[in-house]
Amino acid sequence: MSLPAKADAVSGSYEYLWPEIRCGMRSRSFRNAYRLLAGLILLALPCAAQMQVGDNLNMNLNGNVGFTYAGTDNQNLSGHSMGFSGNGNLTGSYYSPNFLNFDIDPFYNRAQGNSVYGNLTNTSGVTSNVNLFSGSHFPGTVSYNRLFNATSQFGVPGSDIGLAQHTNTQGYGIGWSALVPDWPTLTANYSVNGNSNSILGLQGKNDETDHTLNLLSAYKWDGFRMTGQFIHRNVDANFSEFLDNEAPVRTNSSSNSVGATIQHALPLAGSFGVSWNHLAYDYAYKDAYSAKNSGGSTTVNGNASFHPTNKLGVSFNANYNDSLLGSVPEPILNNGTVVNMASLGSFRSEMVGADVYYQFFKNLGAHADVTHQHQSFLGRTYDATQFFGSANFNFDRSLLKGLSFSLGVVDTVQQTDNTGMGFVGTVNYTRKFSGWDVNGNFSYSQNVQTVMLVYTTSSYSYLGSVRRRLGDRTYFMAGYSGAHSGITANSGTTSSAQRVWTTFMHRGYTLNTYYNKSSGEAILTANGLVPIPGNLPPPVVGTDQFTSYDSKGWGFNAGATPIRRLTISAGYSKSNGHTIDPLLTTATNNELINGVMQYRLRKIFLNAGYTRLRQTVGAPGTQPIMVTSYFIGFSRWFNFF
């Protein structure tokens, strides 16, 4: 005969309980009865006012205290528990709020009824903040936060629900400022944040720790506004075998960024600004093999603008960048992606341009600019001049009232030939027809400025919605939206997403339904799939780092307030999809049912919830999981002191 066991709904571990069965059944019943009695007594406690300790310490504590019965069923292994739950808000000050004030918010066994995954896990933790010398020239702050047993998403672009993952986080920070009048200000902040994620149904976990130091100084002198900043960041991440079928992945990246800006007003309602920034970066990657890269970049930007009249605006700008490294998105570097920096060679870019805008009439405006760029990359040089012109027009005629559009043309000329024209455009329409509110939007862009002259990109998006009042507090709404990438810098990395939704509301009842699908190429990271930036040159990330994905999902949510003080909500969602090599091939299938009820009687709340998740990852060696969680309990709001 097998031993009875208690299941952990998240980790799936079991604890054998022979001693408890032999001698603890009766005592456990008494303990539960005592807890229930204590909970009822708490409901009868009177509320108190603010508490003062001694002559200088003032505190106020309020929150909810409750008693909850909860149950779980994890792979047909059930567990039950009874106990206290609640959350609080402790605020106070010492001597004076300007000398020291604090805010501490603990919570214990809180059901996440407002999250995507409902009350799948009961979360405990605390957030806190202490402010020192707020009324002086040298204010400081200290913060700490901790989160246990939470549930988050391992996301897919364009999808409402990804894979459920168990999450723990912790972070703390300290900051101080020197704000002496007529002197440069100085603000220093140091923070450490860490998180640990494990996808339900998969072995292993992903850990990430982020250390950040930020120094900021500002000064005003004779009309000049000057700022300076230094940022040091170190990210250490460990990814489980989920990211690589052969071995776990570890990455470490550190960066130092130094920057400065200066601004001043100019005649003709004008202004100018100059900024300088230098970034130094070290990056290490290790799994079955190791790779290290380092580099730096310097960027200088300048601009000047004038508004001689209310209708006319003129601006000039210039930019210098001496390294492609400064254009690589940091999220790509910090999420376990192999970046081929060593083979990129040198990169330099100089750009100057001018921009003019004029409002001819109330409904008609025109915009034009010219930009010249010179770039050196991989031993070759490129020169190009780009001309852009656009017009904005709003219709106020009865036939087309509510229609507005902006159309523009881009022409790029390189040193050898004309590379062709691009187009940008946006159309908006808002109108009422026989009680229907109609809204629509369409936008398209092509050949917009990218990292390298030799790339052309394009994308378009659209949105349409209708709304109508059907009766007294009765409404119907529906919409359709989509986004597509057209031409991308990396061949074959297009992506698309579409969504259809409807909403019906009648007095205290609501019903929402949706359907969405998405597909494309992405980069696999510890927190999900990240879309490939459309303007990222192919040499930066090799094509063997791309993951193809396809996802579809649908669901509905319903809410009701059948009687006063009673609210009920329920939802159902289902999604499925797949990813294809090189890093991982999966076939995911998720089904989620959520339900929450709350009834309020004065300061007492009766709460109940139900969540059921069935999740299939489809990776080699994994099995489908099914977790059911439910609870019922009561709570009361108190103002303790």
Image: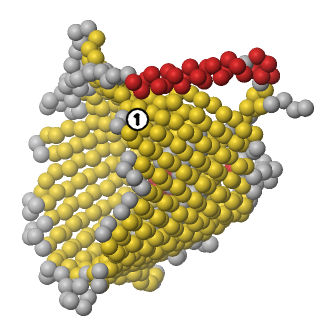
Residue in the foreground of this view, choosing between 249 and 170: 170
* Secondary structure found at label 1: strand
Badge 1, how many Cα within 10 Å: few under 14, some, many 20+? some
Q: Nearer the viewer, residue 341 or 571?
A: 571
Residue 444 in picture, x, y percent from top left = 42, 77
Q: Is residue 404 above or below residue 512?
A: below
Q: Is residue 537 visible?
A: no
**Position of residue 555 measured from the top left corner of the image (x, y, whole percent):** 56, 64
Q: Quadrant of the C terminus?
A: top left
- Which scheme is used to colour this image of the protein? secondary structure
Which of the 4 image quadrants contains residue 286? top right
Q: Amino acid at mark 1?
A: Ile
Determine which residue is flagged by label 1.
Answer: 604
Residue at left offset 80%, top offset 31% = 4
Q: Residue furthest front?
A: 563
Does any portion of residue 636 appear in the rendered image?
Answer: yes
Image x and y of residue 112, in percent: 51, 43
The answer to whether residue 376 is left or right of residue 236 is left
In the picture, measured across the screen, residue 516 lies left or right of residue 409, that is right
